[in-house]
Amino acid sequence: MYSNSAFVILQMIIEDVTGESFAVFMQREVTEPLGLRRLEWTWTRELENAAPMTYGELQEEIGYRQLGCQAVGSEICSVPDFARFVATAVSGPYGEPAGRGVLQPETVATILAPLPAGIGYGGSFSDKKKRNPSDDRGDTLLSHSGSNPGWCAHFTINTTRREGFVIASNSSRGRALNVAVRRLWLKTVLGMDAGSDPLPSEEVWATTLVNDIAFKIAVMLWIVLLAAAGWCTSQIAYGRRRWSGPHPRRSLVVVGPPVLLMLIWWYCFYAPESMPLPLPPTFLSIWTLPLLNYITALLLGWIGFSLLLLFSPPAAAKTLT
């Protein structure tokens, strides 16, 4: 099965056996033998100056992030060198063997062997003949997509014809472009029916759509909260409500629910990792989505309005509070 965690363990094994960092090992064993000048594993000031600004799901600038594990999602590479790396899965134009000496051709063949689930060592495989029975070639395609906040990349290579492409973009919304390019390539190069070219709005990540909807709902609810706060303030000005110290029972009823929800929300999504969580790890997103912050702001607004109600009870309730 495809597993990011397995690559984390693999990095640990390499570092334990060699006694050197993963970046140093990869530079010597992979980058230099393949002649890849722009393949790095850690951000430097030089790379940041050369790289484009990255943009998140809401098209906000998010800058550059160094991940904690280099073996998973930490490759920093130019597109031409990315293409050269992908091309090592097939034989070279001058008879160079697959693997280019970094891996044996037999090892590459093992990597390219499709598994029942269709995903093996980080790649997705498809048999062209299965999708197009009239094709006698039975080409095998190798492809993979990956993304980090602000980055999105994809490659596809026909290991039979030795043709392929790579694409990378500096946006969390880059998947729409990847899908459009892949479909165009499949139709023009391989003659496959890959479906109609998608409009960007049709292929935007579901999280982006949810965030946009959540933002609009949050704005409307904040307007309701502000209107309610304005109404409460006017009631105080007309003497219908008065400033008063909180009563314990009233505090529990008025402020208790939003405070309790806020504590649960913070514990699930903002608590330090050192704290035990009552929910399985699969429940939580690796990256904090903007909609979580919208809900946090609404809960804080609810708490603020509840405090306003708590300290300004109706004037008729004077004897009760």
Image (tube, rainbow, N blue to C red):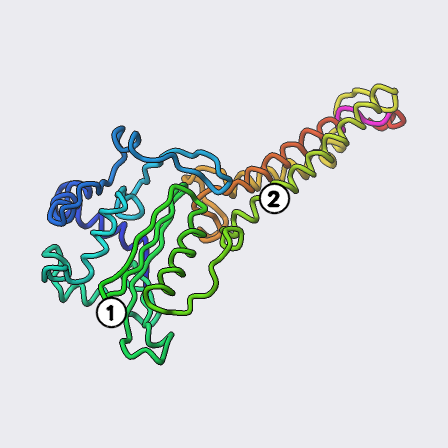
Q: Where in the figure is residue 192, as x and y percent of width and height? A: 38, 69
Q: Distance between the residues labelled 1 and 2?
A: 43 Å
Predominant SS along the magenta part:
loop
Residue 100 vertical position relative to residue 245 in the rendered view, above or below: below
Residue at the disc numbered 2: 214
Q: Which residue is drawn at 68% across and 39% down?
A: 257
Residue at the disc numbered 1: 113
Q: In the depicted view, which residue is nearer to us: 20 or 120? A: 120
Task: Magenta stretch: give its range.
Answer: 309-314
The amino acid on which the numbered mark 1 sits, given as a three-letter code, is: Ala
The amino acid on which the numbered mark 2 sits, given as a three-letter code, is: Ala
Q: Can residue 127 be found in the magenta stretch?
A: no
Mark 2 burial class by Cα count in 10 Å: few <14, some 14-19, many 20+:
some
Residue 162 vertical position relative to residue 75 in the rendered view, above or below: below
290 to the left or right of 192: right
277 to the left or right of 26: right
Q: Residue furthest right?
A: 316
